[in-house]
């Protein structure tokens, strides 16, 4: 009997971990998109997609260039800080501390096959602050970030 129970639990865990529900919130911490292009090319594409959506680009940081200026070496690695103040303000009205994680950030870093674009899942960030009243907004944010990530890495 215990073996059957263990087997059923294992099946439940395996299937539960492999089935993705794109409408469910609080499931992902990271949103990752693989790209065959270089860090600079992928970030250029991502920034263009962000700007085409009418979002604000606040800064672009080249960590590897900054490391080089400090006499250090770092694989290509860039961050884009971007967002929509109308959306971010709604989140900060619920909990001002979420401003620590806003505006949004996207990291593009080098991999052995190109680069990877990484962003925090906005629903996971909001959950960390106990924000549950804006699930439709968070779902829309997640959809926009997925579309931006796909546009930047499939181009």
Image: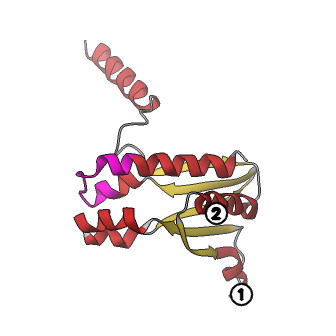
Name the residue at 25% across, 67% down: 93
Whichever of labels 2 and 1 marks the residue nearer the N terminus, that label is 2
Q: Tell me residue 115's x, y (percent).
A: 70, 55
> 10 Å neighbourhood of mark 2: few (<14), some, or many (≥20)?
many
138 left or right, relative to 2? right
* Residue 69 numbered tag: 1
Per the image, label 2 sits on a secondary structure element best described as helix
18 shown above or below 87: above
Residue on which disc 2 sits: 47
134 left or right, relative to 121? left
Q: Tell me residue 124's x, y (percent).
A: 36, 52
Would residue 129 be counted in the magenta stretch?
yes
65 left or right, relative to 12? right
* Residue 95 numbered tag: none
Judged by depth in the image, the label closer to the viewer, 2 or 1, is 2
Q: Tell me residue 149's x, y (percent).
A: 59, 50
Which residues fall within the magenta stretch? 126-139
Name the residue at 45% across, 48% down: 142
Name the residue at 64% across, 63% down: 47
């Amino acid at each position: 009997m215990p073996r059957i129970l263990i087997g059923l639990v294992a099946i439940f865990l395996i299937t539960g971990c492999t089935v993705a529900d794109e409408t469910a919130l609080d499931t992902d911490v990271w949103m990752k998109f693989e790209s065959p292009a270089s860090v600079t090319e992928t970030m250029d594409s991502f920034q263009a997609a962000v700007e085409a959506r009418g979002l604000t680009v606040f800064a672009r940081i080249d960590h590897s260039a900054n490391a080089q200026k400090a006499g250090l070496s770092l694989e290509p690695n860039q961050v884009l800080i971007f967002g929509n103040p109308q959306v971010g303000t709604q989140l900060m009205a619920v909990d001002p501390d979420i401003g620590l994680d806003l505006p949004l950030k996207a990291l593009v870093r080098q991999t052995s096959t190109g680069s990877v674009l990484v962003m925090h899942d906005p629903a996971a960030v909001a959950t960390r602050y106990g924000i549950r009243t804006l699930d439709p907004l968070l779902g829309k944010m997640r959809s926009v970030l997925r579309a931006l990530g796909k546009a930047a890495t499939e181009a």
